[in-house]
Image (cartoon, rainbow, N blue to C red):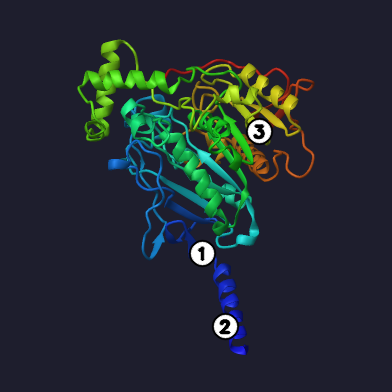
Amino acid sequence: MKKLFFFLWLSIILALISCSKPNPVLTIEGGKIVGVDTPTKGVIAYKGVPFAAPPVGELRWKEPQPVVLWEGVKVADTYGNAASQVTWDPESFYGKEWRASGSVPFAEDCLYLNVWTPAAGQKSRKLPVAMWIHGGGYREGFAYEPEMDGGEDWASRGVILVQVTYRLGIIGFFSHPLLSAESPHGVSGNYGVMDQAAALKWIFNNIEQFGGDPDNITIFGQSAGAGSVQTLCASPKSRDLISKAISMSGGGLGNSRRPMMSVDEVQKANKAMMDHFKKTTPEEMRALSFDELTKMANEYGTTNGRRMFYSPVVDNYFLTKTFSDAALANEIPDIPYMFGFTANDLGDMTKAIQDFCALRAKQSSKPAYAYLFARRLPGDESGAFHSADLWYVFHSFRHSWRPFSAGDEALSLKIVDYWTNFAKFGDPNGENAGNWAPYTAEAPKFMVFDVNGDEAVCTMTDSPEYKGSSFKW
C-alpha cells in the first residue's frame, strides 16, 4: 500500500513539473505536440496544427474527416499550407497592401490552425479563447497573413488566439448532384464553413491543453470571415459552441451584396458547367486540378455571361436558414455580439447593423455592440477602406508600408484592449464601467474609432458617417 501511494505521489509530482515547464509537450487529437517560443516572454506559438485529415484525393468535396494520427512529438514551428487559390495580382490594391501573395504555399491540404497561448499545459487557467476566421471573398486569403500577425499581443492580454484555415473557392464550396448523392446527408457544398465548424469543435475538445476554457470561445472574422461568423452562429452544427461573436465588415440583418443561394440553385449551375466540359462522374471531376477547375469556371462564366460564385449556401443540413432568417426567428446563440464596419467600406452597413443590434436588444438581455472604424489611413487617400482595421485589431503595423503615427499606435492598443475585453467578459469595457454602451433602440449608439494627432479618439455617436469607397479595386 505504501509503495502504491509513493508511485501515485511521484506521478502527481512529475505531472506538475511537466505542466510547469514553459513549453511542455501536450497531448491532443492526433498525438503529442510541442510549440515554439515567441519574442514575447511566456507566450508559446503552435503553428500548423492539423485539425482534420487532409481533404485530398477521395476526400476532396467531402466533410472534414478526423485528424490523421502521427508518431512521436510534432514540433509545431511551421505554418500549414494556405488553401488553393489564385495568386493575388501584386499590382492590385490589396496586392500592394499585404505584399504576402506568393510567399506561402497554396494547396488543397490546408486544414491547419495556429495557437498563441500564455498558459501551455496549464489546464486550470481556463483562459478565454478567440478563434479568428480570415476574409477574402471565400476565394482567397489565409489565416496568418502579415496584417493578422497579432497572436502575441492577444496572448499577452490573457486571451488565447487561434487562427484557422479553410477550403476556398471551387474546392471549398462546390455543389453538384453527384456529390450530394455520395453524401450521407444528401447535400454537397459548404465544405469551407464545415471546416471552420470542425476547427471550432477541435478547439472545444483540445484547448484545455493550451490553458483555455472550452466554454468561453469567441469567434471573430472580417469580410467573408465575418460572413462565416454569422454562418456558424446560424448553423445548428456549430452555434452551441460559441460564447461570443464579432463580425467585422460583414453587414448585419438583411444585408448582403450577393443574396445567399439555395443548394438546388447552385447544383444546377455547377452541373451545367461540368456537363459543358463533359465531366459527368465524381472521378472525372476529382481528377481535375485546382488550376483546371478554375480555368473551366472562368471560361464557362465568360461563355454564358455569368460569373460562377462559390460561397456558403442554404443546404438544409449544415445551414437551414440564412443568418438573417435565423436571427429573426431567434435561432442564433443568446450571447454578446459586436458588429461593425469601416467608414469607406464596400457599402453602407449602418442600417443592417442597427437593425441587428436593435433586434437583439428586443430578444435578449445579452448586449450587442456597434462600431464604425473611421480612421483614414495615412500614406494616401484610400481612407478607412475595407480591411483597413486589421492592422489595428492585431497591432501589426510592422508589416505595413504606411507611415502610422503615435495616434495610430494608441488607437490600435485601445482596439486590442476592447476586442480582448470582449472575449474575456462579453463587454469591450472590461470588468469596469466604460463609455462603450450596447446599441439599443432607445440608445442607438455606435462607437467611432479615429485619431486626433497623437491621441486615439473613441467616441459614441448615434449617426455614424459612411463616406463611400474611396479607392479602385
| Image location of residue 295, percent across then percent down | 25, 24
Q: Compare marks 3 and 1 and give the one earlier in the sequence.
A: 1
Using the numbered discs, state the Cα–Cα distance from disc 2 to disc 3 in whole angstroms: 49 Å
Question: Can you tell which quarter of the image residue 332 is in?
Answer: top right
Q: Is residue 270 above or below residue 141?
A: above
Residue 308 appears in the figure: no
Residue at x-position 37% and y-position 60%: 70
Between 211 and 259, which is closer to the camera in this rendering? Answer: 259
Circle 3 residue: 337
Question: Is residue 168 among the parts visible in the rendering?
Answer: yes
Q: In percent of the image, x 44 and y 42: which residue is there? A: 144
Q: Residue furthest bottom?
A: 2
Determine whether 84 is above or below 466 in the image: below
In this view, the mark in front (2 or 1): 2
- Across and down, in percent, residue 187 comes to 41, 30
| Contact check, label 3 and label 1, Cβ < 8 Å | no
> Which amino acid type is shown beneath numbered disc 2?
Phe
Circle 3: element type = strand
Which of the marked residues, 2 or 1, is nearer the chain's N terminus?
Answer: 2
Q: Secondary structure under badge 2?
A: helix
Q: Give whichever of 67, 377 is nearer the camera.
A: 67
Q: Is residue 400 left or right of residue 368?
A: left
Q: Which residue is mark 1?
A: 23
Where does residue 69 sit, x and y in percent of width and height? 38, 58
Q: What quarter of the picture does the C terminus occupy?
A: top left
Between the residue at mark 3 and the residue at mark 1, the CA separation in whole angstroms equals: 34 Å
What percent of the width, then of the height, locates residue 398? 49, 42
Residue marked by disc 2:
7
**Crowd rating for badge 3 (residues with CA inside 10 Å; few <14, some 14–19, many 20+):** many
Which is nearer the N-term, disc 2 or disc 3?
Answer: 2
Q: CA distance from mark 2 to mark 1?
A: 25 Å
